[in-house]
Amino acid sequence: MARIIDVAKHAGVSVASVSRVLAGLPGVSEETRARVQAAAKALDYRPDLAARRLRSRRTDTIGLIVSDIRNPFFTEVSRAVEDMAYEHGQRVILCNADEDPEKEAFYLELMRNENVSGVILSPTLPLLSHFKAADYGFPIVLVDRCERGTEADAVVLDNLDAAYRLTEHLIERGYRKIACLYGAASATGQQRYEGYSQAMMRANLTLQGRALRPAVAEARGATLELLGGRQPPEALIASNGLLLLGIAEGVRELGLICPAQIAVAGFDDLPWVRLVDPGLTVVAQPTYDIGRAAIELLLQRIAQPSQAVRRVVLRGDLIVRGSTAARAATAPAGA
Amino acid sequence: MARIIDVAKHAGVSVASVSRVLAGLPGVSEETRARVQAAAKALDYRPDLAARRLRSRRTDTIGLIVSDIRNPFFTEVSRAVEDMAYEHGQRVILCNADEDPEKEAFYLELMRNENVSGVILSPTLPLLSHFKAADYGFPIVLVDRCERGTEADAVVLDNLDAAYRLTEHLIERGYRKIACLYGAASATGQQRYEGYSQAMMRANLTLQGRALRPAVAEARGATLELLGGRQPPEALIASNGLLLLGIAEGVRELGLICPAQIAVAGFDDLPWVRLVDPGLTVVAQPTYDIGRAAIELLLQRIAQPSQAVRRVVLRGDLIVRGSTAARAATAPAGA
DNA sequence: ACATCAAATGTAATCGATTACAACTAGAGC
DNA sequence: GCTCTAGTTGTAATCGATTACATTTGATGT
């Protein structure tokens, strides 16, 4: 493998000139530039990144720590992050923390060791509660999750508003007994539950919330339980796509007809929600935009480490489908 | 940030001793070991990875180049790869080549520059056709795609067999006019089409194949076209999850009843396939195992660069659901 | 008491770039 | 002709580890 000194010899110049040409710095004559480029091409020279990183103290690498890449929301976000990162000459190291604070700490530690340019993170609840971006040696941008007082750049959905509107929609359509299954592991789930709560209380309706671990089976179980009990709800809301899937499974398992017997709504406009029977009403998140906004914030902070904390709040898009069609006047009580 | 020389001074030993202790090499007294560890902890020392990589010529980084992480198959595979990689002290750089040979070449180039320990790759068709792992400066393992003569380690499904069994199942259930929508961009799609063809020919049935770009909209369009024409097929087969989704969309759009009016089957046991109306019959791929097998092959090849080429062929699992229920004796022709 | 040897430790070269600084060149101004 | 400046170019220090090789230490055998 050719080294910079080989290129220098081949071109008959010094290593400094080679370095300058290849870095595109000014102060090099056209002739030298041409000779160096020719030599580099002739020798198929490629700089050793380890050496460059050691000397320059820059890695051009960003870390992306999500809870689980298999969650379609994060899949999409990570895709956006990767696209943008490579466009800006950055590599991406991807990590799955599985909502586990220990794994999360491990990966943040890893990022420090890797000396990354910056990190995009969807934090667990315990980490978020005292989170200060300044505590880390590198720029951090949060995605999907953040609380009012969090001292960090962040890109989030307006969760409270979105959940409020979704719940309001159900109320308008005539549903009264509405239960909400929400993720207990993230701030986002809590905020969406809060939006649901506010809408319900405003309409003087009784809250029925279930905090769940973010897993399909959890939501399925809760659905079977709720709908199998006495006083089953008329409508179910899921705070994210995984839980929505679980609800759909449970409803299907019970053989209930949607929305006549049970209305369903949730978050994340996943490819399949329009396929299950009457089509599911959801709040769509602009996932790709979320990813893109996150990396833009990050790149700007890398360039300007001391700028004020910024927050991008995006609005969810309510997509109404058959699963929340207007409720029949009153359910015939016992026929 | 503490450097190794600081640790050495603090412990009253040489840098060599520190390095030895931290690398876990033998030939260090218990006392030195303890002092070094204490010093390292006291100073919160963390080795500079760039320096280490420069000197040791190892990066402990593997590259994962897939066509699109948003394809659930690759999502799952990449999850497995990441889990295993971090367990073995390797970082993962993730790249999406989008079935684009240029992007693919760019990323392979990047991997070379990064001096990765190895790469896991799902190659495009043109790359695969002349692929030799030995042409690259690093170990490579292929996933999901490989041809008979390919000179590279690979982990693949027994595509021909799986597609054959799936088609055979439809034939047994009484379907005759069976169309197959398959991905034109990958060897895998072609092999599955081949399995379909063999099963059809064995039963003396007429082939009806559509080579498509791997996109949901393509399959949806083809479905509308096929089912809208004269002589519509009685059953549709998709060679992967994306195309299956497109078929499901198309069928739903036309308001056809499955399987009475159209049977559907495909590949990939995605979370939603049991939810759409009668449940879709599919061949399930052991995706996590595929990812795990890939990285195991890779780690072994890294350890033993000159060992013989190996291939892991996994068997698909036919999961029968309502979408391929036995066909009614003969469709009443016009009532 | 001394040669021998293994274990422990230290010294310094090395990986391959970037970059501060010095040195050189040529033309402008006086 | 001489100084000054601006534009090029080169030399060598530097980043922070690993590791080949040299050296010291201490135990063992005779």
Image: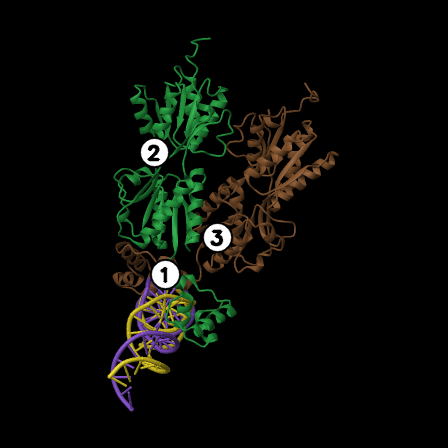
Chain colours: A green, B brown, C yellow, D purple
**Percent from the top left, x then y, of residue A211?**
35, 28
Q: Label 2, on which residue?
A: A159
Do the numbered discs 1 and 3 sit on residues whose CB atoms are within 8 Å? no
The part of the image, by quadrant, that contains residue A333 is: top left
Secondary element at image label 1: helix
Q: Which of marks 1 and 2 is in front?
A: 2
Up-down: is B218 above or below B130? above
Q: Give me the C-alpha separation between circle 1 and circle 2.
A: 52 Å
Q: Which chain carries label 2?
A: A
Q: Specify whether disc 1 shares its chain with disc 3.
A: yes
Amino acid type indicated by mark 3: Gly
Q: What residue does disc 1 label?
A: B20
Residue A97: percent from left, percent from top? 39, 42
Question: Residue type at mark 2?
Answer: Asn
Q: Nearer the viewer, mark 1 or mark 3?
A: 3
Q: Name the residue under label 3.
A: B63
Q: Can residue A85 be seen in this view?
A: yes
Front-most of residues A89 and A174: A174
Q: From mark 1 to mark 3, how far is it between C-alphas? A: 29 Å
Specify few, some or many for label 2: CA neighbours under 10 Å numbering under 14, 14-19, or 20 or more: many
